[in-house]
Amino acid sequence: MRIPSFRRALWLAVALLPAAPMVASAQAKTDSVAIRRIYDEALTRGESYENLRYLTGQIGGRLSGSASAEQAVQWGKTTMEKLGLDRVYLQEVMVPHWVRGAKEKAQIRADRGKGVALNVCALGGSVGTGGKLRAGVVEVQSLAELAALPAEKVKGKFVFFNRPMNPRYVETGRAYGEAGDQRRSGAAAAAKRGAVGALVRSLTLAHDDFPHTGTMRYEDGVVQVPAAALSTNGADELSQLLRADAALTVELEMSCQTLPEVKSYNVIGEIKGAKYPEQIISVGGHLDSWDLGQGAHDDGTGCVQSMEVLRLLKATGLRPERTVRAVLFMNEENGVRGGTKYAEVAKQNKENHLAAMESDGGGFTPRGFNIEAAPAVVRKIQAWQPLFVPYNSGQFVVGHSGTDIEPLQDQVKALIGYDCDSQRYFDIHHTAADTFDKVNRRELELGGASMAALIYLLSKYGL
Amino acid sequence: MRIPSFRRALWLAVALLPAAPMVASAQAKTDSVAIRRIYDEALTRGESYENLRYLTGQIGGRLSGSASAEQAVQWGKTTMEKLGLDRVYLQEVMVPHWVRGAKEKAQIRADRGKGVALNVCALGGSVGTGGKLRAGVVEVQSLAELAALPAEKVKGKFVFFNRPMNPRYVETGRAYGEAGDQRRSGAAAAAKRGAVGALVRSLTLAHDDFPHTGTMRYEDGVVQVPAAALSTNGADELSQLLRADAALTVELEMSCQTLPEVKSYNVIGEIKGAKYPEQIISVGGHLDSWDLGQGAHDDGTGCVQSMEVLRLLKATGLRPERTVRAVLFMNEENGVRGGTKYAEVAKQNKENHLAAMESDGGGFTPRGFNIEAAPAVVRKIQAWQPLFVPYNSGQFVVGHSGTDIEPLQDQVKALIGYDCDSQRYFDIHHTAADTFDKVNRRELELGGASMAALIYLLSKYGL
């Protein structure tokens, strides 16, 4: 691309006028000036990117119960204390403590020839294999297909769940949701049919060698069998080899285990509302992450953006009229204990929660917000949408908000999910590739700015 | 992020309904089905990503006049011939042949201490230094500041243009346009004041060590002095050292030169219109690139997307009613000879051109289209916008289209620029980092699909 000529520059100037009807009222003009200040601060002096660099580089992956999760708690507290907030505190919560263990490998053993290594990782919560576990493999596309198989086809084998995410959906999250039952419930379903374990195609639209971990659940009264994710390349290879030799075996060895629960914390920072301090607006991400990568996009970005919301309000002098809390939730990935605890404490203390926002879809270019609220409340929030159009962040739709704030649903008027571009998220989600270098500074800072802008309006006008 | 629970899935389903008013007419329904077919084909069997892998990996950077540019011409022709089009041909065009040469380095020499290496690259079109060129440095923020300096401050020195791109703009292209005069005209302006060369801060919002090349122009009758880009880190360091020691010198050595012009080609593939073959719609990108990287986002992506438009129309059986041409333009970067020639030949042959589209802003997640046309034509195109909303590609605004199609402006009813997310583009633009690994498959294929969808509507309805 070349530099536009003068004529081009004119076109550009026209193109950059807001596409939406001009905001007319003096009120809206004041808001638009305030929002411009927030974006200016974020784009010129934003701190979330450097905060994320520290969290991912110096602390790294931080699964609930791990030493690095506790380091992250201390980091979150210290970082917020430096912001000069009205209050920074920890909220105690007991969390599961699952550990991957040192051994995690698999290979395909066909009748002839040597073994073919498979890229695998244990699904979070899986039991270990107790040494090497070798068995035949039956491939299915769904839980329903498994249920319909004759018992002898399944008994003593690995069930290999190989349904890919649907690439036709423009929103990758939809494909993730639809394919996720295999990961979540595959092992329990396999065990019920007498299988010895579950091998699950990674939940991603990428074709590569990274296995994607993620949480899975056992069922009461059903034997617990090990469950592993295969990289998509590995799953394709296994499927191909199975077509050539249905009697091949897979040898899986995983030393993962669940240890006793551990005390951990949500990290909370607060700016007291100037007019209505009793009304609380929360904005958060989750501080824990899976252990394989650095937890950059999932969900380091949501944490640093949430803290940045407070910093932006302070730095711009836009003192909120209602109380704004940044919450770094512990244990979203494998338990939602932090989100659950936060809502419990809010209810116990009879706190007055107005709204909650979460950023947990990565730190990509903003699009807008997903709103869960009564229709009249949705319309009220959507009325602010024109203010976000100049920032390409004006997609205000009804949709999924966030897992950590969901437990608050009966106490708030609105749950709001920060929404950003979703194309790259599942390429790296829950893998060793979820690292700082995948995050773009401007995309991240723009996200924090759009979150801060909406939080500011909520704090000014209520709902 | 976890898998949404069932309740979440319901929310998601609601969220994914088109936000725009439902398209009501039977016509629009037919169009919406056709567009869905285009996207399905692109998202499940898209070929542009693998085409780009070949172009960038096997051919690489391809500056006009180079051997690799000629390889790219042959590759474009062969690749389109495999698509079973009605016609594939080359259009001859003479192009400049500037070469970087083997030597390209610089260092800062302060009075005391050893030299500090500076990351530099020659700007495209620059003369070489003829051995080592050592001189003092005067830093300015603008051409105007240079013009106002007393002669003795400039004479015999390097003029160091250090105005950064403005990070406040949400659209990075706007900041690029505004800062670009330093690169384009800096050397000529410096020479007029008696300077020996120009050092220009790279046009990027990133803070790193990559120098960004790009075209610059000399003026008739003004002595030609060498011009180099400094990485932003290098520019910051030079500025800092200058504040400590205004008498420091920079030693620059560049062996770049301009060789005689070379014969090259635009590569053109065509599907004849079923009803109105004489009416032509062009869609293109530019085949040449700067030499430092692989020319992935600039503009390999535009080339493979333009070819993919034809492939998608063929594969979906959506035979266009008007003629659709994919054009891989030669020499956008340092001359626009290909775009100029294409428009000249169109006029000479009295071709009937309806519209032209270009993709030259990278292969990032689609947003929509920038339109240059009379207001009534803009409105006609904007009427199709609801069809693109479900694909997050519904931003149809007046704006810059593309450099290669601009010469066609007097022959078409509309010039259209494919518009995609702009946050990452200038991080890598014109650098060694513009490589295949920066391109996301889905982002790229979604772009080709949205281009094909609009080309299909143009070919069906005209303007």
Image (tube, coloured by chain):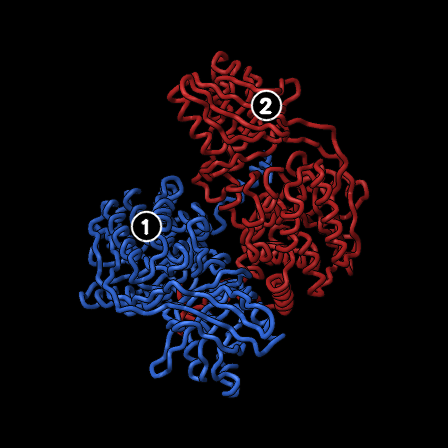
Chain colours: A red, B blue
Q: Is residue A391 above or below residue A326?
A: below
Q: Position of residue A433 (x, y in %)?
A: 54, 42
| Image quarter hosting the C terminus of chain B | bottom left
Which residue is disc 2 drawn over? A226
Q: Amino acid at mark 1?
A: Val
**Horizontal side, residue A14 vs residue B358: left or right:** right
Chain under numbered label 1:
B
Describe the element under mark 2 as helix, strand or loop.
loop
Which residue is disc 1 drawn over? B309
Query: Quick one: A368 or B103, which is closer to the camera?
Result: B103
Whether residue B322 is visible, yes or no, is no
Mark 2 and mark 1 residues within 8 Å of each other at the beta carbon: no
Same chain? Circles 2 and 1: no
Whether residue A347 is visible, yes or no, is yes
Task: Single out the mark in the foreground, 2 or 1.
Answer: 2
Q: Amino acid at mark 2?
A: Pro
Describe the element under mark 1 as helix, strand or loop.
helix
Q: Which residue: 54% across, 32% down?
A: A180
Query: Quick one: A357 or B117, which is closer to the camera?
Result: B117
Q: Position of residue B215 (x, y in %)?
A: 39, 68
Rate crowding at label 1 as few (under 14), some (14 to 19) or many (20 or more) other CA atoms within 10 Å.
many
